[in-house]
Image (cartoon, rainbow, N blue to C red):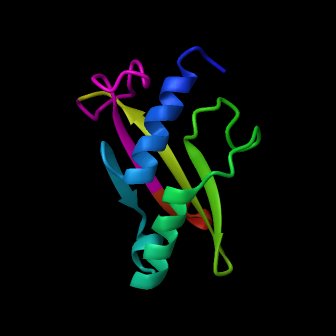
């Protein structure tokens, strides 16, 4: 774990739980779900707490896998620079970082 991991984790958790402070993107497979199933999936992303060393090796809470009604989904947070054209130079600094959370079917990965 890096010395910035606790701050990155805090920022990621706040964004994931509220969907405020970044961009939320769903893939075509998620967009095609029935409204009730898509809402349930997004609620599951917000409530996700099943972090372990396998899915969170850097302790940043930036990835999760969810099983919902027999289907597997992934969500992932990526860090971009303010211009959204390159990676963030420091994901622990909100002034330098734009977060994007993507929700997808596992087979779309």
Count the marks: how many? 0
Relative to 14, say whether 18 is above or below.
Answer: below
Seen in the image, is 23 located left or right of residue 72? left
Work out whether residue 9 or residue 25 is closer to the camera in this orientation and state it. 9
Q: Position of residue 82 (x, y in %)?
A: 25, 28
Q: Position of residue 65 (x, y in %)?
A: 64, 57
- The furthest residue to the left: 83
10 or 53: nearer the viewer: 10
Q: Is residue 90 above or below residue 9?
A: above
Locate residue 60 relative to residue 27 in the image: left or right. Answer: right
Write down the region rendered in magenta: 83-102
Q: Is residue 96 above or below residue 26?
A: above
**Residue under the image location 64 percent in, 81 percent down:** 69
* Residue with the most extreme top position: 3
Q: Residue at x 51, y 70 (%)?
A: 41
57 left or right of 15 in image: right
Point 37% across, 21% down: residue? 93
Residue 108 forms part of the magenta stretch: no
């Amino acid at each position: 774990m890096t010395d910035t991991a606790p701050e990155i984790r805090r920022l990621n958790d706040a964004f994931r739980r509220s969907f405020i402070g970044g961009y939320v993107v769903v893939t075509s497979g998620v967009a095609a779900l029935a409204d009730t199933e898509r809402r349930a999936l997004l609620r599951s992303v917000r409530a996700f707490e099943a972090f372990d060393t396998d899915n969170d090796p850097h302790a940043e809470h930036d990835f999760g896998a969810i099983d919902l009604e027999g289907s597997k989904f992934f969500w992932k947070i990526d860090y971009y620079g303010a211009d959204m054209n390159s990676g963030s130079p420091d994901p622990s600094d909100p002034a330098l970082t734009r977060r994007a959370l993507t929700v997808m079917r596992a087979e779309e990965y």
